[in-house]
Amino acid sequence: MTRVAAIDCGTNSIRLLIADVTDGRVADVHREMRIVRLGEGVDATGSFAEPALARTRAALTDYAALLVEHSVPTVRMVATSATRDAANRDEFFAMTAEVLGAAVPGAVAEVITGTEEAELSFRGAVGELDSEGAPFVVVDLGGGSTEVVVGTPAGVDASYSANIGCVRLTERCLTSDPPTATEIADARAVVRDALDAAFEAVPVERAKTWVGVAGTMTTLSALAMNLATYDSEAIHLSRVSFGDLLTVCEALLGMTRRQRAALGPMHEGRVDVIGGGAIVVEELARALGGRAGIDELVVSEHDILDGIALSIA
């Protein structure tokens, strides 16, 4: 058994997994997510905002305390889309080195490529799936980017990191509350262009099973199941028909932020951006239905965090 910690710092959230890994199996000790919106404004300005860095530092300080509490000897922290794009990312890395290094000497954050992000997400997502469902197309829909990966339990065959995500798309296109028909149409055009490029690189038509990971996907599943509150156990490996999926997405796009906030499974940090995520999911469902004949989404709570943990165990 090896105790490790994985930290994933994305555009919208920062997440922690402390786990014991034995023979390639991940047993959770502690799993947590905070919405810090590190990538707020990065699409427009190209730089991290000081309040966003401060929010991230506060969450990471709490995570560092948990590393000490649980006697974690090894930690890997990765940063993704927003950090790849930010001109002042050195400021971010100085902060993470200071905070993490106080808990685990020598620990630092690293920025990973879209290809590395896709591979880690795929490894984490398919670990519990029956190989009869392969090839899998795994989609990691984040705040700043969306990774599309095709592969089998033996490994990744092809991947692509599309520069769209729920935060980036919302900031770029969906400014009204609720978004107007014109804004939604503009957002769809952006998503389709990005996905067309992804499908040129990734042979999704070979896939038998679509697996979705990250907060937009899990929240849509919770809403499709009419859960009163967010329930990770009920959501993990749930299956959502495309009919139910599209119904939920369309409903969210017609709601005000106040109405979304009143939904039981909705995290307050997703209220303003889940409409952007819903558009990406809708376009993916229509494309995968047409290209691969897939008619349902399998939602996994295991994702890049699990992949990171396995990479250092």
Image: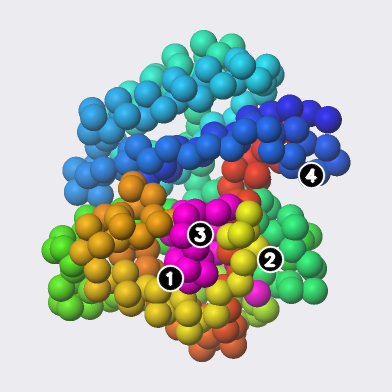
x 55%, y 80%: residue? 241
Label 4 sits on what residue type? Arg
x 79%, y 68%: residue? 131
Label 3 sits on what residue type? Thr
Q: Nearer the viewer, mark 1 or mark 2?
A: 1
Q: CA distance from mark 4 to mark 2?
A: 19 Å
Residue 25, label in figure: 4
Circles 3, 4 touching at the beta carbon (< 8 Å): no
Residue 199 position in % (x across, y down): 49, 74
Tell me which segment is drawn in magenta. 209-232
The answer to whether residue 12 is magenta is: no
What residue is shown with label 2? 151
Query: Could you tell which of marks 1 and 4 lies nearer the N-terminus?
Result: 4
Label 1 sits on what residue type? Val
Query: Could you tell which of marks 2 and 3 lies nearer the N-terminus?
Result: 2
Residue 281, label in figure: 1
Label 2 sits on what residue type? Gly
Residue 217 position in % (x across, y down): 48, 62
Which type of secondary structure does the marked residue at label 3 adopt?
A: helix
Which type of secondary structure does the marked residue at label 1 adopt?
A: helix
Q: Quadrant of residue 72?
A: top right
Query: Could you tell which of marks 3 and 4 lies nearer the N-terminus?
Result: 4
Report the colour scheme.
rainbow
Query: Could you tell which of marks 4 and 2 lies nearer the N-terminus?
Result: 4
